[in-house]
Image (tube, helix red, strand yellow):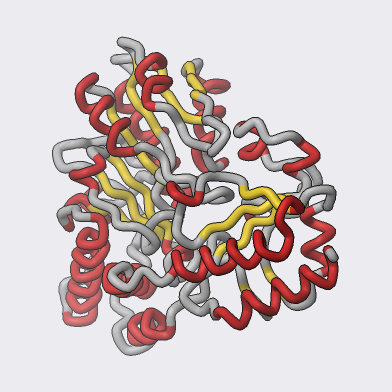
């Protein structure tokens, strides 16, 4: 199979799996215990926490391990709402957020009467800082804008929005699940209070995530119980998966220095334009995108049908969370892309294992189907 859907999920890196294996067998202790097995597990968690922190320029004490990126997002949104509702019940987000942001916000609206302002994006899928500034109110308690979009790869002006929120005294969260391991992240430079990571997006297992919480901030836990994770998330820690995430973050930090994605993505783009010209349209701005992501509409074609006609190629017509939907992507609709163009969209996302030969194979198949 030619796998070009790395934005949906990634395979577990062999070194990550090897680092996890001992904690399923020999080192299986509960990190809350004080004998050797427990101490070994606790030390492994501490080391993993440091590796995750290093990837995003944080301190280890600022890292909370969660069961997923969705849990991290819910922790922020519901935790801030519970902790700061006396100050206000207004939250700002954007039209292109993941359901793990939009659904918790809808829950707060329907159950507790919160107000949510949803700012638009431009034709490239980017939020305008001035729109966030206009939306800020005295009762705004949180702004949550994704670092990059999972469908188009568009990078958002997080640093500028962070500065705006910091000046206004408003908490700021970004979901960087799609960006980690693809572009450099530094929480101090971005001026964020919260940042979400998801393990399965950067060659760690599914079922593990992390949340950066800026030192000095305390929010109500999503899961109550015992005092694991410094009292911020009850539940016996998933040591093998935490170790896996730490190893993946350590490898991602090294991998970022090589930046191979841009060359592969650009090669794919140039092959598409050279062979199909006006038959395709790129959705998003490749100059301000994730280096691995290419969202292309094939004019006059249905993206899902075209994907089905490709042999042994795994890609996506949008977010993996909406697979099976026959509707156009809400993200592309928010960008003002006509429905007939959006219907022809396919998202290709390359990864560590992608080869030039695989891209050539896809181009060859597309030539047979489109010419």
Q: Residue at x 54, y 38 (%)?
A: 124
Residue 262 in the figure: left or right of residue 350: left
The percent position of residue 33, horizontal first and vertical second, equals: 21, 70
| Residue in front for this viewpoint, 175 or 346 | 346
The image quadrant where one finds the C terminus is bottom right
Q: Is residue 79 above or below residue 269?
A: above
Rendered-image quadrant of the N terminus: bottom right
For residue 203, which quarter of the picture?
A: bottom left
* Residue 358 placement: quadrant: bottom right
Residue 210 visible to the viewer = yes
Position in image of residue 34 (x %, y %): 16, 72
Is 230 located above or below residue 205 in the figure?
A: above
Residue lying at 37% horizontally and 49% vertically, measured from the top left: 196
> Residue 28: image x %, image y %?
33, 80
Relative to residue 248, is residue 33 drawn left or right? left
Q: Is residue 31 visible?
A: no
- Return the residue nearer the eye: 107 or 329: 329
- Figure quadrant of residue 128: top left
Residue in the foreground of this view, choosing between 139 and 156: 156
Residue positioned 17% across, 75% down in the render: 39
Left or right placement of residue 126 versus residue 19 in this view: right
Picture layout, residue 172 above or below residue 288: above
Residue positioned most to the top: 138
| Residue 293 spot, x, y in % from top left | 53, 58
Position of residue 295 relative to residue 130, above or below, is: below
């Amino acid at each position: 199979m030619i796998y070009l859907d790395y934005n949906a999920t990634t395979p577990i890196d062999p070194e990550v799996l090897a680092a996890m294996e001992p904690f399923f067998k020999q080192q299986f202790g509960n990190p809350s215990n004080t004998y050797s097995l427990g101490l070994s597990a606790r030390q492994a968690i501490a080391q993993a926490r440091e590796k995750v922190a290093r990837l995003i320029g944080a301190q280890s004490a600022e890292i909370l391990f969660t069961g997923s990126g969705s849990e991290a997002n819910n922790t922020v949104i519901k935790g801030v709402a519970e902790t700061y509702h006396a100050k206000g019940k207004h939250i700002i987000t954007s039209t292109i957020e993941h359901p793990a942001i939009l659904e918790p916000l809808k829950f707060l609206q329907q159950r507790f009467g919160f107000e949510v302002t949803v700012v638009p994006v431009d034709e490239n899928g980017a939020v305008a800082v001035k729109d966030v500034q206009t939306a800020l109110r005295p009762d705004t308690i949180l702004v949550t804008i994704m670092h990059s979009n999972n469908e188009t790869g568009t990078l958002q002006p997080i640093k500028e929005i962070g500065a705006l929120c910091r000046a206004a005294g408003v908490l700021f969260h970004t979901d960087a699940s799609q960006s980690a391991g693809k572009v450099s992240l530094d929480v101090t430079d971005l001026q964020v209070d919260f940042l979400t990571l998801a393990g399965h997006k950067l060659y760690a297992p599914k079922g593990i995530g992390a949340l950066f919480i800026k030192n000095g901030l305390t929010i109500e836990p999503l899961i109550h119980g015992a005092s694991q994770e410094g009292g911020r998330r009850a539940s016996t820690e998933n040591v093998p998966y935490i170790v896996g995430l730490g190893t993946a973050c350590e490898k991602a930090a090294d991998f970022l220095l090589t930046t191979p994605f841009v060359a592969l993505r650009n090669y794919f783009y140039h092959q598409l334009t050279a062979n199909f010209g006006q038959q395709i349209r790129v959705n998003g701005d490749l100059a301000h995108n994730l280096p691995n992501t290419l969202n292309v509409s094939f004019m006059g074609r249905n993206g899902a049908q075209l994907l089905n006609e490709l042999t042994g190629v795994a890609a996506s017509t949008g977010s993996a969370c909406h697979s099976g939907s026959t509707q156009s992507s809400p993200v592309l609709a928010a960008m003002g892309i006509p429905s007939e163009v959006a219907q022809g969209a396919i998202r290709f996302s390359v990864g560590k294992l992608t080869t030039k030969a695989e891209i050539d194979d896809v181009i060859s198949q597309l030539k047979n189907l489109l010419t």
